[in-house]
Image (tube, rainbow, N blue to C red):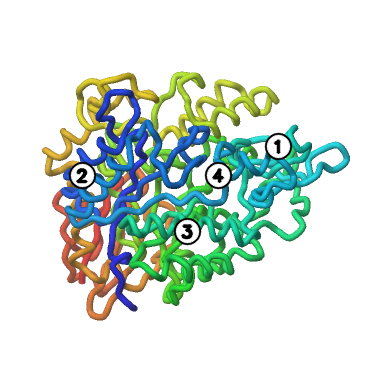
Amino acid sequence: MERAWWKEAVVYQIYPRSFMDLNGDGVGDLNGITSRLDYLKELGVDVIWLSPVYQSPNDDNGYDISDYQAIMKEFGTMEDFDRMLAGIHERGMKLVMDLVVNHTSDEHRWFVESRSAKDNPYRDYYIWREGKDGKEPNNWGSAFSGSAWQYDDATQMYYLHLFSKKQPDLNWDNPKVRDEVFSMMNWWCEKGIDGFRMDVISLISKPEGLPDGQMFPGMEYSPIPCANGPHVHEYLREMNREVLSKYDLITVGECAGVTIEEAKKYASLDGSELNMVFQFDHVGIGDAEHGKWTDRRVDLVELKKVLDGWQTGLAGQAWNSLYFSNHDQPRSLSRFGDDREEYRVVSAKMLATCLHMMQGTPYVYQGEELGMTNCPFPSIDDVRDIESINAYKEMTESGKITPEDMIRYIRLRGRDNARTPMQWDDGKNAGFTEGTPWIMVNPNYTRINAKQQTADPDSVFHYYKKLIALRKEEPVIVYGSYEPYQQENESLYMYIRRLEDAKLFVVCNFTDQEQTVALPEDFAEGSVLITNQENAGVQHEMTIGAYGAVVIRR
């Protein structure tokens, strides 16, 4: 397999609003990030992915951009950005920017012009349609509840917004839009950034004619039917020609609705589009009648089926991205592991082992390396996320879910779980800010924080540090083939990696009970590469403790 630096890298995602606040206004900022770069260098990560820091009215926490070439005032200035970028590069790390170009803010100058008149030169930068039978142009629903269409009085037409009504979708079928986007991307690349994470990039090409989508029982609108549209690969190949191929970048596309077959196109090893994609099959496991608003747990056999499928399905044809959590997901420890205090540390280490030993580029979300957990939000008044707030209103007012159940589901699955402030120490506001935090601090920060963990060699932090270092030392972790093992086992996640003479056997216990495993014959003479257990010697029949993880090298 062809080597590439982005295959060998570990990426760390920063959610700037919640990472570190240096000026005391309760909101994280760029200077705060710069002040913590040595922490990330110590952890050993290679790439920092920064969630959006562009100018934005903040309807969707910065994913509604009003100026792609300016910095949000709450986060600082372009000079602060340049200083941060220089600090990242001085420490031998790279920076990935969040590229949000399926939509803009309705306060972007393009949309201000577009909505002003039907004959405005910017009108066709967005997707406008006449109503149908006194209603919306079609039955599409927004990802944030309600219709995906907003009526605009100025020209008495509807515009499309797959997300918030303050996030109108760009019309990628207009070559001028593509030219504007590519020009902006080149501007950032010339500034010296090292790659792009592309927000909902699989949705940029809408179905021809915008037909009605499929309806499901109990739903007022159709789920978004725009994934992997007719021209998406054509537009990404054009982006690659005009921008990506000119620089040595790392690129990952957030691809809602992507299949393994589609991913082979987006992330083909021929380099014609992107390096890799984020897929959502594993984070959607357990969804129920009302989507993610449920308390169902993740079934291990189903999780293995999904992740094994991606590992074997892309083998030799495309590259995997590896993640359990990000800014749009609850805390991985609370979702896939066990966040009870008795098991929190060992469970966090187990999950990290399971993910980082797979083939692909691992993504660590801020605080994941500390074993941060979901937050016990007391009420909906403590929630800041537009998706959760809209869903709470829709579900409770319609009587589909009681207010008590809905806040419980938000504590389990809501996006704000990942957005509570980074827990730096056991002081005021977890060391995040001297001011009033924009969102509540998780009350367990006195027990779970970076100051305590960096000083403790047995901490989750130091375990992540060791896992990240092993990727640099063991090519089999990066490039080895992947073989599922005992896929129907309901307690243990096991797989084998092979590269030339090197072999790894990975065993992860997803339960709070001891499990016994008979090693494959050729691993009985192996040695332990990494484990979260004490005294884990290699023997033909091994006992794996609660949430135990062992990697055996042969």
Q: Which residue is mark 3?
A: 183
Q: Earlier in the sequence, mark 3 or mark 2?
A: 2
Give the residue displayed 34% in from the left and 78% down from the top.
Answer: 1
- Cα gap from disc 3 to disc 2, whole angstroms: 30 Å
Label 3 sits on what residue type?
Answer: Ser
Label 4 sits on what residue type?
Answer: Thr
- Dividing the image into 4 quarters, which one contains the C terminus? bottom left
Q: Earlier in the sequence, mark 1 or mark 4?
A: 4
Counting from the top left corner in percent of width and height, residue 17 is at 37, 34
How packed mark 2 is, by other alpha carbons closer than 10 Å (few <14, some 14-19, many 20 or more), is some
Q: Earlier in the sequence, mark 3 or mark 1?
A: 1
Q: Earlier in the sequence, mark 1 or mark 2?
A: 2
Q: Which residue is mark 2?
A: 37
Label 1 sits on what residue type?
Answer: Gln
Q: Earlier in the sequence, mark 4 or mark 2?
A: 2
Q: Which residue is mark 4?
A: 104
Kindly give the residue lying farthest to the right in the view shown: 133
How packed mark 4 is, by other alpha carbons closer than 10 Å (few <14, some 14-19, many 20 or more), is many
